[in-house]
Image (tube, rainbow, N blue to C red):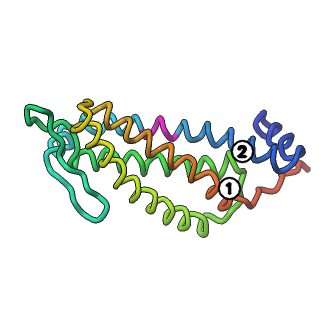
Amino acid sequence: MGLIDKVDKMAASKGKTVETVWQFVKFIVVSMLAAIVQFTLLNVIPLIPQVKELYATPVDWFVFNYPVNHDLAGAVISGGLGYCIAFNVSNIAAQIVAFFVNKEKTFNSSANIAVTLPIYIVFTIALICFSAWLSPTLNTLFTEKWGWGDALARNVSTMVCSMLQFFLYFPVDKLLFHKKKEDKKSV
């Protein structure tokens, strides 16, 4: 039995409140891991020349409204399909990491993936749609109205969306992953 397993047992023995606080601490750590994945991809994907070219192509479909943002001289500085790709690919990758690590490590859940994953996907799609609306809205505000550079605006917009998702995912995950794995007893 590893250290985390021992702390899990100790927290569970102290009651539901202590166990939930310990799960929240683990959730924070997993969220930081997911954030590393997200921000790495968010900043690497725009370096791909084919993606960078797409910053000049506006997107306006459903909640995906990614206008092309220009600096005062009229040069493209952010937005468009390139930003849409970078933001959404990085967000989806982070959620995939978070789902599996939280199920296994944070909540030690034996919940059926065939049941929990579709619910998680629907919730994630709703959050991605919300974030797909919020992020470019903030990005445009930061770049065109406040004069921030592309990288700063892109990262701060993503941080805001990530923080909102963080606080919404914990109760959903706690509910989805409530079924605990049974202790394996050595024979």
Amino acid at dot 2 = Gln
For residue 91, side relative to residue 117 (left or right): left
Q: How many marks?
A: 2
Tell me what residue is drawn at x 65 percent, y 65 percent: 112
Q: Position of residue 22 (x, y in %)?
A: 75, 41
Residue situated furthest front in the rendering: 145
For residue 67, side relative to residue 62 (left or right): left
Q: Are marks 1 and 2 in contact (CB under 8 Å)?
A: yes
Amino acid at dot 1 = Lys
Tell me what residue is drawn at x 22 percent, y 44 percent: 79
> What is the number of the mark on residue 23?
2
Q: Nearer the viewer, residue 19 or 69?
A: 69
From this view, report whether residue 147 is shown above or below residue 64. above
> What is the number of the mark on residue 174?
1
Q: Which residues are magenta?
A: 34-38
Task: Using a 10 Å C-alpha cutoff, classify the residue at mark 2 as few (fewer than 14 neighbours), some (14 to 19) or many (20 or more).
Answer: many
Q: Main secondary structure of the magenta part?
A: helix
Q: Is residue 170 magenta?
A: no
Mark 2, secondary structure of its residue: helix
Instruction: Give the CA distance from mark 1 to mark 2.
Output: 9 Å
From this view, report whether residue 69 is shown above or below residue 152. below
